[in-house]
Amino acid sequence: MDQTKAPLYEALERFGKQRVVPFDVPGHKRGRGNPELVNLLGEKCVSLDVNSMKPLDDLCHPSSVIREAEALAAEAFGAANSFFMVGGTTSAVQSMIFSVCKEGDKIIMPRNVHKSAINALVLCGAIPVYVNPEVETRLGISLGMEPSKLEQAVKDNPDAVAVLVNNPTYYGICSDLRTIVKIAHSRGMKVLADEAHGTHFSFGDDLPVSAMEAGADMSAVSMHKSGGSLTQSSLLLLNDTVNADYVRQIINLTQTTSASYLLMSSLDITRRNLALHGKTSFKKVINMASYARDEINSLGDFYAFGKELINGTSVYDFDVTKLAVYTRDLGLAGIEVYDILRDEYGIQIEFGDISNMLAYVSIGDRYQDIERLVGALDDIKRLYKRDKTGMLSSEYLSPKVAVPPRRAFYADKASLPLKETEGKICTEFVMCYPPGIPILAPGELITKEIIEYIEYAKAKGCNVQGTEDFSVERINVLK
């Protein structure tokens, strides 16, 4: 196919040049009815915020320019089929799970999944079989899915229908995806990859293997993260082992019937940019991230980790574009460095947790931005370093599942003060966001260590959320 084309974007451009009188939605009528919106976003942007019509196709049942744009995306990513997703990668992850799991089906997954995956289990009633990852004790981060542990999980649960794996984790950790695919397929199980942070894997020579290349059946890709499309726009990729027509039916159960053409055209443009220039762009990103890693490590007290973590099992590969930095040797939690960078230096990083911070380096960054970040961290070391005694050392706690997520979420519940919940079964989510990996999910046992972790995260300034009680002072538990 001709990857220089952007059929949906080009159709939208043609439409924008026509003088069509709008007696359809949206009601702002190309911005005339909402001048403040025009002032905020610009006349061109608002004029192209249109609804489905014959010249622009229909995302729910594409037959022309959207269909062609999706086919181009599939080819660019080495997939058999692709779907434009306007509900973010959350909707792509959930569509993957809904496509292979019914109520009562087992799905094997690591526990350090994004909340969207466990939310999908609440909705469809599938049963998780967790392969708890190893933890890097110094950094406090969960690692990848080890093939030996997957082998055991498959042996113990031969009736499981699928395996879900992160490729990569938020911190850049990659599992041995090719071996995972072989193990799962040998037992007739589908392999689903949460590739939210791996868009660039299809466009780099020195990057980990992409899910499609490794033979995974489905992959959820956040084009708006490292790819550069508009926020909330993503792709769902399929290999030829999956019935694409059925998957579209699944997607249409939950996806909007009023898809944003701004989001979809951004996917089309971004796919073209990646197909034509991705390898060059991400080579630059790799070089910038590597330079930043070296500069930060030369400061002392900070540790920007990288490929030295690779051990062939729990860390099979590492995404060098991920600039994750360990901060506890400075006596500061990652979230504290996050706050200082934003409030004192005007630098917004992706997230900070108990032990680490993540600066997301991608195609829009510049070397002068890297220099500003390194300089700010040097300043923070000089001004804010303190004794690290008493800091919480553990970042990831392996929970115990006592009740399936769906049953726990919809069960009769009682609201208790956090400190009184030890030994109870949680019926809701508790997480720091980002990264959105639940500390507790519905159906899991609340322990003393988990309570202490939640209290510590709140005290350090993490954005703890997910509970019915907005302040996370109380947690809903099984009656």
Image (cartoon, rainbow, N blue to C red):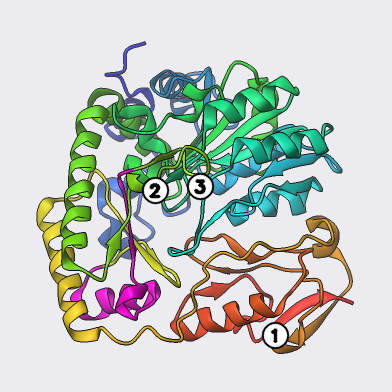
Residue type indicated by callout 1:
Leu
Q: Quadrant of residue 200?
A: top left
The relative height of residue 205 versus residue 421 in the rendered view (above or below) is: above
What kind of element bears circle 3?
Answer: helix
Instruction: Give x and y (percent) for residue 249.
Output: 69, 30
Instruction: Give x and y (percent) for residue 151.
Output: 70, 34
Q: Which mark is residue 309?
A: 2
Q: Which segment did they paint magenta?
A: 320-347
State which mark lies toward you, 1 or 3. Answer: 1
**Mark 2 or mark 1, which is nearer the start of the sequence?**
2
What residue is disc 3 on? 88
State which mark lies toward you, 3 or 2. Answer: 2
Residue type indicated by callout 2:
Leu
Instruction: In this rendered view, identify the residue nearer to me: 346 or 401.
Output: 401
- Please tell me whether residue 324 belongs to the stretch shown in magenta: yes
Q: Residue at x 25, y 23 (%)?
A: 276
Q: Which mark is residue 418?
A: 1
Q: CA distance from mark 3 to mark 2?
A: 30 Å
Q: CA distance from mark 1 to mark 3?
A: 32 Å
Q: Residue at x 69, y 80 (%)?
A: 448
Instruction: Give x and y (percent) for residue 102.
Output: 81, 38
